[in-house]
Image: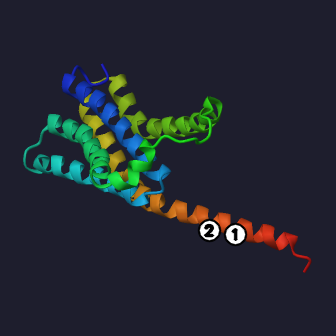
Amino acid sequence: RLFLGDSTFVLALAIGIALYGIQYVVRGACAGVHWFGGYGQALLGDGFVRLAVLLPVVFVASRDLAAAACAAAAIGGFAVPLLTGKRHLKPLLRRGEGTHFHYGHALSFAAPAAAIAAADQILVNGGPVLVVLGGGHDADRVAGLVFAATMIVRIPVFVFQGFAASMLPNLTKLQAQDQAEVQRGAGDPD
């Protein structure tokens, strides 16, 4: 009922979820090894594939092509860093001592992050979903219009995402350096 019986959209959703799952793991791996260039490559790859697949829609309106583009965009997001960053990601394959993984610690981070992600998706996709579930004569057209408007509004968020990925590690480093200087200053008798 959500996609008004359109099996292509259901398939695109399933494929998109799987591929974006891989992309987010690759982004996390890039951030984990402090290769923020790779994180940026993931965002650029996603955007490039999205534009490349959607370009034909400019000439031939196709709902199926638009659905495929949404799912396919994730491929660029994980393929580019994996192809270009073998040297950077190699430390992830090494076995070592490391610290013991605690599920409770991971859950204490993942639960709030999942709540934020769910709220984001409700805000972004809630309008079109409510329109479709409410039904009506032009429900699919109105839902498409609401979704398109929402995506246009999100363009600055998508652009800022890459900026934030490169800026936040530097801000964290500066904050840590500042705290170290404050702690060193607290021990001085002056």
Identified at 23% across, 48% down, the residue is: 50
Identify residue for label 2. 174
The answer to which image quadrant residue 11 occupies is top left
Q: Quadrant of the N terminus?
A: top left
Residue 46, percent from left and from top = 29, 49
Q: Secondary structure at mark 1?
A: helix
Q: Residue at x 85, y 70 (%)?
A: 186
Image quarter hosting the C terminus: bottom right
- Return the mark for residue 178: 1
In percent of width and height, residue 40 lies at 37, 58
Q: Is residue 175 above or below residue 124?
A: below
Q: How many marks?
A: 2
Question: Which residue is at 74% across, 71% downward?
Answer: 181
- Residue farthest to the right? 189
Q: Is residue 47 above or below residue 69?
A: below
10 Å crowding of disc 1: few (<14), some (14-19), many (20+): few
* Left or right side of 2 for 98: right
Asked if disc 2 and disc 1 are in contact, CB closer than 8 Å, the reply is: yes
Instruction: Determine the secondary structure under disc 2.
Output: helix
Position of residue 181 relative to residue 157, above or below, is below
Q: Is residue 138 visible?
A: no
The amino acid beneath tag 1 is: Asp
- Which of the 4 image quadrants contains residue 69? top left
Q: CA distance from mark 2 to mark 1?
A: 6 Å
Percent position of residue 188, x then y: 87, 75
Q: Which numbered circle lies on residue 155? A: none
Colouring mode (rainbow / by chain / secondary structure / one colour): rainbow
Residue 96 place in picture, x, y as percent: 53, 42
Q: Is residue 16 visible?
A: yes
Image side of residue 183 versus residue 27, left or right: right
Mark 2: amino acid? Leu
Comparing 76 with 181, the one in front is 181
